[in-house]
């Protein structure tokens, strides 16, 4: 059951929770805390939940499977976000490019998951 604060954030048909597999949960937590200021709650050694401003999810211990879903995050300052990804050890796999709705870049995290960040 969602808490009252979580219920306020829920919107019909939004992506509400995303789970990742990670070979190293401590490393994943460090990476996403540095990049996007996600906060974590550990539930044992093999699971941690995260909360961001507009997305919640978790990391469970396991071998990452690349290429299943592209998670896209919004940024008000795409260059600052890209700098944080690089600084935290991420790899840019598609440099910033324009598309009809704005611009975005794609990167892989330390487990090889590919994500994107977009901006208007």
Image (cartoon, helix red, strand yellow):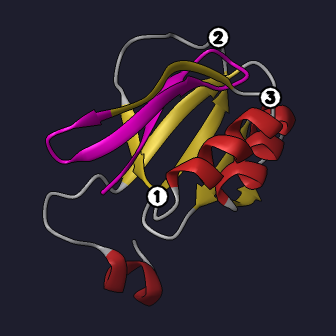
Q: Which residues are magenta?
A: 98-120
Distance from disc 1 to disc 3, alpha carbons, whole Å, reads 19 Å
Q: Are marks 1 and 3 in contact (CB under 8 Å)?
A: no
Q: Can you give x and y, in whole percent of width and height, for residue 48 in the image? A: 70, 47
Q: Which residue is mark 3?
A: 89
Q: Is residue 44 left or right of residue 104?
A: right
Rendered position, 94 above or below 63: below
Distance from disc 2 to disc 1, alpha carbons, whole Å, reads 28 Å
Rendered position, 63 above or below 96: above
Question: What residue appears at the point 49 percent right and 37 percent down from the top-left corner?
Answer: 19
Question: What residue appears at the point 64 percent right and 10 percent down from the top-left corner?
Answer: 63
Q: Is residue 84 magenta?
A: no
CA neighbours of label 3 inside 10 A, class few (<14), some (14 to 19), many (20+): few
How many tags in the picture?
Answer: 3
Q: Can you give x and y, in whole percent of width and height, for residue 40 in the image? A: 72, 59
Distance from disc 3 to disc 2, alpha carbons, whole Å, reads 19 Å
Mark 3 vs mark 2, foreground winner is 3
Q: Is residue 33 left or right of residue 103?
A: right
Q: Secondary structure at mark 3?
A: loop
- Taking depth in this image into account, of 102 and 55 the one nearest to the observer is 102
Q: Which residue is mark 2?
A: 63
Q: Secondary structure at mark 2?
A: loop
Which quadrant holds the N terminus?
bottom left
- Taking depth in this image into account, of 15 and 47 the one nearest to the observer is 15
Q: Is residue 105 left or right of residue 97?
A: right
CA neighbours of label 1 inside 10 A, class few (<14), some (14 to 19), many (20+): some
Q: Can you give x and y, in whole percent of width and height, for residue 111 in the image? A: 68, 18
The numbered dot on residue 75 is 1
Q: Earlier in the sequence, mark 1 or mark 3?
A: 1
Q: Are marks 2 and 1 in contact (CB under 8 Å)?
A: no
């Amino acid at each position: 059951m969602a808490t009252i604060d979580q219920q306020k954030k829920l919107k019909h048909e939004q992506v509400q929770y995303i789970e990742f597999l990670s070979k190293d949960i401590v490393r994943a937590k460090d990476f996403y805390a540095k990049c996007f200021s996600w906060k974590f709650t550990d539930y044992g050694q093999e699971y941690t939940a995260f909360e961001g401003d507009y997305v919640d999810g978790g990391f469970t211990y396991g071998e990452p499977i690349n290429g299943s879903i592209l998670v896209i995050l919004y940024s008000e300052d795409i260059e600052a976000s890209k700098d944080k990804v690089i600084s935290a050890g991420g790899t840019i796999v598609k440099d910033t490019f324009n598309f009809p709705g704005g611009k975005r870049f794609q990167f892989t995290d330390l487990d090889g998951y590919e994500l994107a960040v977009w901006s208007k």
